Image (tube, helix red, strand yellow):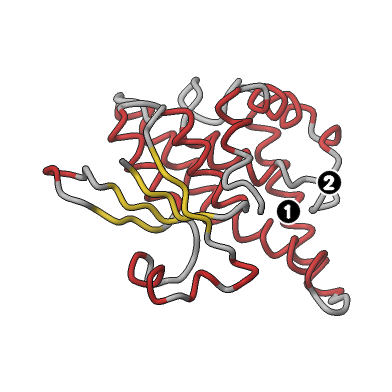
């Protein structure tokens, strides 16, 4: 059994989508980041970085429990545990991992800053809005050009790279982006959102 510590954010949804897609048994423990649950001693013991998501797998390597934080690391672990959505072919595996890292190092941080400065900042910060807004659009352009030649993000198949990127693109309204500006991203987005496991994963954990 896997214990999932998460909240309804883009990073959290990456893992709940993966758990649903891989049909792994799990229990959800909501960590309300609006109420600072992530700073509790109990959660800090699981993730010293005090960020969601995190998991504890009671049946980890060698049959011993393991706790994992950082959503990218969790996705890789779950894919290896289930034997799904991370190709066995070395070239395809590297292709998947490089696009996963593209999300971790580019889309996540930049889109996150756009969300903050457009929605949470107490007053407009023009420099930040321009800087992060331009980079957000550039990242969409990278995706759009790539998806013009590829049905999925990596390895010619649906992988954890798609699971990682989808919840961030799903916030396109927060970024004040119209998906029709990027027709290939829009085609990919509509393909992924039709998956039942994705639909279920996007609702976890349920809001109180």
Whether residue 112 is visible to the viewer of this picture, yes or no, is yes
Tell me the CA gap for discs 2 and 1: 9 Å
**Residue 204 appears left or right of 29:** right
Q: Indicate which disc residue 40 carries.
A: none
Between 7 and 122, the residue placed more toward the observer is 7
Q: Is residue 119 above or below residue 101?
A: below
Q: Residue at x 51, y 41 (%)?
A: 16
Q: Position of residue 181 (x, y in %)?
A: 85, 36
**Percent from the top left, x then y, of residue 127?**
82, 74
Which class describes the residues within 10 Å of circle 1: few (<14), some (14-19), or many (20+)? many
Residue that label 2 marks? 177
51 in relation to 15, above or below: below
Report whether 23 appears left or right of 201. left
Residue 128 percent location from the top left of the image: 78, 72
Whether 46 is drawn above or below 67: the answer is below
Residues at discs 2 and 1 in contact (Cβ within 8 Å): yes
Q: Secondary structure at mark 2?
A: loop
Give the residue at mark 1. 136
Residue 23 horizontal/vertical position (percent): 41, 27
Q: Quadrant of the C terminus?
A: bottom right
Q: Residue furthest left?
A: 62
Q: Secondary structure at mark 1?
A: helix
Would you place residue 129 above or below residue 163 in this image? Answer: below
- The residue nearer to you, when weighing 43 against 111, is 43
Within-10-Å neighbours for mark 2: few <14, some 14–19, many 20+: some
Residue at the image point whose x is 45% and y is 55% from the top: 5
Left or right: residue 24 compared with residue 113: left
- Residue drawn where x is 30% and y is 24% of the image: 89
Q: Earlier in the sequence, mark 2 or mark 1?
A: 1
């Amino acid at each position: 059994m896997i214990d999932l510590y998460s909240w309804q954010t883009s990073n959290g949804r990456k893992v709940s989508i993966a758990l649903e897609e891989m049909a792994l048994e799990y229990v959800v423990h909501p960590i309300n980041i609006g109420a600072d649950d992530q700073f509790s001693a109990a959660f800090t013991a699981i993730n010293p970085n005090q960020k969601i998501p995190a998991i504890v797998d009671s049946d980890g390597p060698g049959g011993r429990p393991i706790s994992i934080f950082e959503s990218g690391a969790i996705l890789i672990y779950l894919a290896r545990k289930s034997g799904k959505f991370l190709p066995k072919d070395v070239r395809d595996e590297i292709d998947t991992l490089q696009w996963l890292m593209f999300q971790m190092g580019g889309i996540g941080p930049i889109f996150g800053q756009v969300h903050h400065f457009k929605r949470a900042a107490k007053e407009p910060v023009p420099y930040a809005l321009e800087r992060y807004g331009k980079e957000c659009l550039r990242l969409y352009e990278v995706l759009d050009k790539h998806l013009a030649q590829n049905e999925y993000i990596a390895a010619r198949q649906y992988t954890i790279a798609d699971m990682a990127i989808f919840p961030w693109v799903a916030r396109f309204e927060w970024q004040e982006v119209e998906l029709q500006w990027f027709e290939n991203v829009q085609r990919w987005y509509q393909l992924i959102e039709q998956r039942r496991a994705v639909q279920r994963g996007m609702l976890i954990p349920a809001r109180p």
